[in-house]
Image (tube, helix red, strand yellow):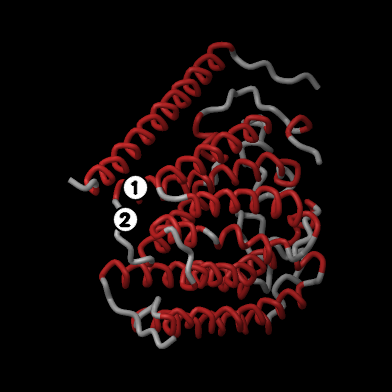
């Protein structure tokens, strides 16, 4: 039995959706690392002896 | 091991929702709930932003282990009614994609949790992912009827990770939360498997009713229940639970024991051929007692953790005699 052939238009749309999801995931990661860094650094800066 | 290359592939390309399903979102919601309970019960002041990111990491770690599980178990998932619609066995997502997703999310969640909180919490999360993906999925699940007993540790660890994320330590009370989920798992899953054992048998998974029989499974459900319910009272003595918790754990525990006794006295799991195929969890004749215990076990565990969460969030004191 031959494997069903995917519709190129649908395939392209699905690929685009996955790419957007991946991009959003990467952006989320960058934002989270930034936020964690700021919050943790902020706490340490506050604890510095003056 | 027969994985995705041998499985069908649909003509429709995978959608992002199929990838979300790889993470087992319902299991993830339970992990989030128990991890938050652990974090709140630690009674430590946690920066709310860091706390939220830590819970997010624990949830993503749980999702990563689920993706590993879906990749490895695609062959047996395809044989069971309960799991055949999952993304990999249904051909919506390639097994290699699930494997890659599991790997990337594991690294992401562990590293970010370590950066956000501490490396004890991150190490515990890494161990949980390893235990679920390798020890349970790849080893125990296909080799021993004790699979869900030992493998249950993976599902029991999130409150300890939450506690460790908040404090950097994992004291007795954190492990008590872990022990409660650990002891809850056998009666919960064996009650389910009593009325889905045909599926497990078809897939070659050595669940207790398949290997030891329904009568032995019912007896072990009762034994584990007799150990589990007193364990649920212990947090009152260690100061983790207060009087409200004592009432919930005591009354709920009595109901749990009554239901476990009914399962023991029933013929649950033995009435083969009387199955009603109208729905996923339709019950074989005589197995209603098992279904009742399965349903109540979810409610009981939820109530226990919700009560602890409420008591600590509201600052209600525990009794604590130890």
Q: Is residue A32 above or below residue B174?
A: above
Q: Which mark is residue B50?
A: 1
Residue shown at 52% from the left, 69% from the top:
B175
Q: Is residue B155 above or below residue B77?
A: below
- Find residue B189 and report its horizontal and vertical position in percent: 63, 65
Q: Which mark is residue B46?
A: 2
Q: Quadrant of the C terminus of chain B?
A: bottom left
Nearer to us in this view, B79 or B207: B207
Task: Identify the chain of the residue marked 1, using the numbered disc in the image.
Answer: B
Both marks 1 and 2 on one chain: yes
Q: Which mark is residue B228?
A: none
- Find residue B298 and report its horizontal and vertical position in percent: 51, 67
* Viewer can see residue B25: yes
Nearer to us in this view, B199 or B66: B66
Task: Identify the chain of the residue marked 2, using the numbered disc in the image.
Answer: B
Circles 1 and 2, Cβ within 8 Å, touching? The answer is yes
Nearer to us in this view, B85 or B27: B27
Secondary-structure class at tag 2: loop
Residue shown at 44% from the left, 27% from the top:
A26
- Neighbour class for label 2 at 10 Å: few (<14), some, many (≥20)? some
Give the residue furthest to the bottom.
Answer: B321
Q: Quadrant of the N terminus of chain B?
A: top right
Side of B87 where A42 appears, left or right: left
Q: Quadrant of residue B187?
A: bottom right
* Viewer can see residue B251: no
Secondary-structure class at tag 1: helix
Q: Is residue B159 above or below residue A43?
A: below
């Amino acid at each position: 039995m031959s494997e069903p052939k995917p519709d190129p238009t649908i395939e392209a749309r699905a690929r685009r959706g996955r790419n957007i999801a991946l991009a959003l995931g990467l952006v989320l990661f960058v934002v989270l690392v930034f936020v964690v860094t700021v919050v943790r650094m902020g706490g340490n800066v506050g604890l510095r002896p003056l | 091991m027969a994985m995705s290359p041998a499985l069908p592939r649909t003509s429709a390309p995978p959608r992002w929702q199929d990838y979300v399903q790889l993470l087992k979102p319902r299991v993830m919601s339970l992990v989030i709930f128990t991890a938050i309970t652990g974090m709140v019960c630690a009674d430590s002041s946690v920066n709310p932003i860091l706390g939220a990111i830590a819970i997010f990491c624990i949830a993503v770690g749980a999702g990563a282990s689920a993706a590993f599980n879906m990749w490895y178990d695609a062959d047996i998932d395809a044989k069971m009614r309960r799991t055949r619609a999952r993304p990999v066995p249904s051909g919506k997502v390639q097994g290699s994609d699930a494997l890659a997703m599991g790997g990337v999310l594991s690294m992401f969640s562990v590293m970010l949790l370590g950066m956000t909180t501490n490396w004890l919490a991150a190490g515990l999360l890494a161990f949980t992912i390893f235990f679920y993906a390798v020890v349970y999925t790849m080893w125990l699940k296909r080799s021993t009827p004790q699979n869900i007993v030992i493998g249950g540790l993976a599902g029991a660890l999130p409150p300890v990770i939450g506690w460790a994320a908040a404090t950097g330590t994992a004291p007795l009370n954190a492990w008590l939360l872990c022990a409660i989920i650990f002891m809850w798992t056998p009666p919960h899953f064996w009650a389910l498997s009593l009325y889905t054992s045909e599926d497990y048998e078809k897939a070659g998974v050595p669940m207790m009713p398949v290997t030891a029989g329904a009568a032995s499974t019912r007896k072990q459900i009762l034994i584990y229940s007799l150990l589990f319910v007193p364990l649920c009272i212990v947090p009152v003595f260690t100061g983790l639970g207060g009087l409200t918790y004592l009432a919930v754990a005591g009354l709920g525990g009595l109901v749990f024991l009554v239901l476990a006794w009914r399962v023991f006295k029933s013929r649950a799991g033995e009435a083969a051929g009387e199955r009603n195929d109208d729905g996923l969890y339709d019950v074989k004749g005589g197995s209603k007692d098992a279904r009742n215990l399965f349903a109540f076990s979810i409610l009981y565990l939820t109530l226990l953790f919700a009560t602890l969460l409420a008591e600590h969030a509201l600052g209600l004191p525990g009794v604590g005699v130890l």
